[in-house]
Amino acid sequence: MSENAQLHLVCNAHLDPCWQWEWEEGAAAAVSTFRTAADCCDLSEGLIFCHNEALLYQWVEQFEPVLFERIRRLVKAGRWHIMSGWQIQPDCNMPSGESFVRQMLIGRSWFREKFGVDPRTAINFDSFGHTRGLVQLLRKAGYDSYIITRPKQNDCPVPADDFIWVGYDGSEVTVKRCIGYGSPLGKAVETVQPVAEATAKDGTVQLKLWGVGNHGGGPSKQDVKDLDAYIAETRDVAICHSTPEGYFAALRESGRPLSRLGRFGSGPRRPHYARPGSDPAAGKPAPGRLFPPPGPFAPGRRPPIAGSPVRSPGPVH
């Protein structure tokens, strides 16, 4: 095994609070996902669950305060990692600079108050592009690194998936572009293994995102058991449960030279700003529009708690 070959596994559960569903379903998915993740942290001594979006934690605090306190204990113990620290994961092409600033300011302030943390790595897994103006804003907000999954190589070719992104004013952040942000249920090892084999061959430091996502889910108990067994039996690459900050620290320590890129992040892509049932030309709402959904305090809205008819999806164990 090359002493430099390291694979950092970042467990997460991509979850859109609202897209083609109402906020109650997103809140139910958050509660279900976070409960499952906490259970999995108890199952595996090494697992670190990583999640972002202050809005989801606020829903958990309101509707499941016991679970929220459990998460706070896990964060303090280093078993649960507050990732990115934004209010939500927004579109990163269209919003104004002030909108980005508010995402960071409001989210980071809340996480600092509730958990005493200040993430250094920002993430936006599901945006289909990233304005170059973000670089300066990220640096001024206290970030030094950024993880994305899009645009993909065929839309926006880059020399390597790790690079230095240079903003208009010369600010810099280190970027990691990952291939996908999760893994199918029951197939975590199958998803991780090809990356581990490539990492061992190259002798590099790499990152792999895993966990059921695209409407919550996170780790399953079986996937955690399977991955822990795979980590224990693998000898040609050091594999560890990690965090975004842990990966970038290892990348810096490796001394790998990185390309410097200016314009990046706005490759061609099919429209995702209007979906069936919307009419942008007529000014009618689209499900993905950048307005907050009716909040949990809106009159007449049912909370996703025991007895609620809201569907509560999550991995099946």
Image: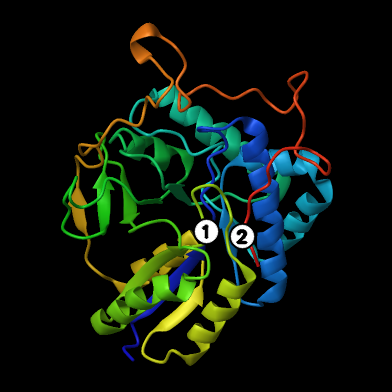
Pinpoint residue 124: horizontal percent, then vertical percent: 42, 45
- Label 2 element class: loop
Pinpoint residue 132: horizontal percent, then vertical percent: 28, 36
Pinpoint residue 14: horizontal percent, then vertical percent: 51, 50
Up-down: is 184 above or below 55?
below
**Residue 137 falls in which quadrant of the image?**
top left
Identify the residue at image location x=26%, y=59%: 161
Q: Earlier in the sequence, mark 1 or mark 2?
A: 1
Instruction: Report if residue 112 is visible in the image.
Output: no
Please say if the residues under marks 1 and 2 sit with CB atoms less than 8 Å apart.
yes
Q: Residues within 10 Å of mark 1 (few under 14, many from 20)?
A: many
Q: What is the three-letter code of the residue carrying label 2?
A: Pro
Q: In the rendered structure, find residue 315 and report the number of the disc placed on it.
A: 2
In depth, the one of 304 and 111 nearer the eye is: 304
**Residue 220 falls in which quadrant of the image?**
bottom right
Q: Residues within 10 Å of mark 2 (few under 14, many from 20)?
A: some
In depth, the one of 69 and 173 nearer the eye is: 69
Identify the residue at image location x=49%, y=52%: 120
Residue at which label 1 appears: 212
Identify the residue at image location x=64%, y=61%: 80
**From the viewer's perspective, is 11 left or right of 281?**
right
**From the viewer's perspective, is 158 left or right of 309?**
left
Q: Nearer the viewer, mark 1 or mark 2?
A: 2
- Label 1 element class: loop
Pinpoint residue 222: horizontal percent, then vertical percent: 60, 74
Q: What is the three-letter code of the residue carrying label 1?
A: Val
Identify the residue at image location x=25%, y=83%: 201
Instruction: Report if residue 74 is visible in the image.
Output: yes
